[in-house]
Image: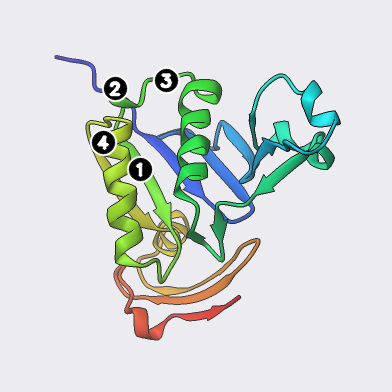
């Protein structure tokens, strides 16, 4: 019997990104969802070793980097920086090849269909992942509590959603959102 690769789970949030291997009790990687780039104008920026910093690497260098938050109100807005975050997760933190693992990503309630399509395109075309799945964060929270029906209050860094679910599915028109 052939060994199957363990799925990589990534929870992209406006403030925090979490990633790890399916089946483990906690994420292996938790870091701020931020990207820092060297400022061309600042004199101190010339002393930096590289052009781009991800997550915790940016914290101590905030004063000399241009900071970007690729996810705003739970929705990915800067795809170039989001790709940098995923690359950082795969190669630097988890030290895996994404083309050898299925990827399970989360999305916030009310995520536009066009974002889900773009996410899928990037995972298959840029990272060559063999399989992927996108789940609503609220449905996963309910699942973790051992229930399939309920109301989930998902309060993140930038946005809060109240999501009623019945048998793990929700209707967008019933979701309440507060930015």
The residue under label 3 is 96
Q: Residue 73 occupies which quadrant of the picture? A: bottom right
Q: Residue at position x 49%, y 58% from top?
A: 77
Badge 4 element: helix
Q: In the drawing, what numbered circle is on residue 100?
A: 2
Q: CA distance from mark 2 to mark 1?
A: 13 Å
Badge 2 element: helix
Q: Is residue 171 above or below residue 146?
A: below
Question: Hey, which residue is sitting farthest bottom in the picture?
Answer: 173
62 to the left or right of 54 = right
Tag 2 near tag 3, CB within 8 Å? yes
Name the one closer to the observer, 112 or 153.
Answer: 112
Q: Residue at position x 43%, y 68% from top?
A: 109
The residue under label 4 is 125
Tag 2 near tag 1, CB within 8 Å? no
Q: Nearer the viewer, mark 1 or mark 4?
A: 4
Quadrant the N terminus occupies: top left
Q: CA distance from mark 2 to mark 3?
A: 8 Å
Mark 2 or 4, nearer chain start: 2
Q: CA distance from mark 1 to mark 3?
A: 15 Å
Badge 1 element: strand
Badge 3 element: loop
113 to the left or right of 1 = right
Q: Nearer the viewer, mark 4 or mark 3?
A: 4
Name the one closer to the observer, 135 or 121.
Answer: 121
Question: Hey, which residue is sitting farthest left in the picture?
Answer: 1
The residue under label 1 is 104
Q: Position of residue 116 (x, y in %)?
A: 32, 57
Tag 1 near tag 4, CB within 8 Å? no
Q: CA distance from mark 1 to mark 4?
A: 16 Å
Q: CA distance from mark 4 to mark 3?
A: 17 Å
Q: Nearer the viewer, mark 2 or mark 4?
A: 4
């Amino acid at each position: 019997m052939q060994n199957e690769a363990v799925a990589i789970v990534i929870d992209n949030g406006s403030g925090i990104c979490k990633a790890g291997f399916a089946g483990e009790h906690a994420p292996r990687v938790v870091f701020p969802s931020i990207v820092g780039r060297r400022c061309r104008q600042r004199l101190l920026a010339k002393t930096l070793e590289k052009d781009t910093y991800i997550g915790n690497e940016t914290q101590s260098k905030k004063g000399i980097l241009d900071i970007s938050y690729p996810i705003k109100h739970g929705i990915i807005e800067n795809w170039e920086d989001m790709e940098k975050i995923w690359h950082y997760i795969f190669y630097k933190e988890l030290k895996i090849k994404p083309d050898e693992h299925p990827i399970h990503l989360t999305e916030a309630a009310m995520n536009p269909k066009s974002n889900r399509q773009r996410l899928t395109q990037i995972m298959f075309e840029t990272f060559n992942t063999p399989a992927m799945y996108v789940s609503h964060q609220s449905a996963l929270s309910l699942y973790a509590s051992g229930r399939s029906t309920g109301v989930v209050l998902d309060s993140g860094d930038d946005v809060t959603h109240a999501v009623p679910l019945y048998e793990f599915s929700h209707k967008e028109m019933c979701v309440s959102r507060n930015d």
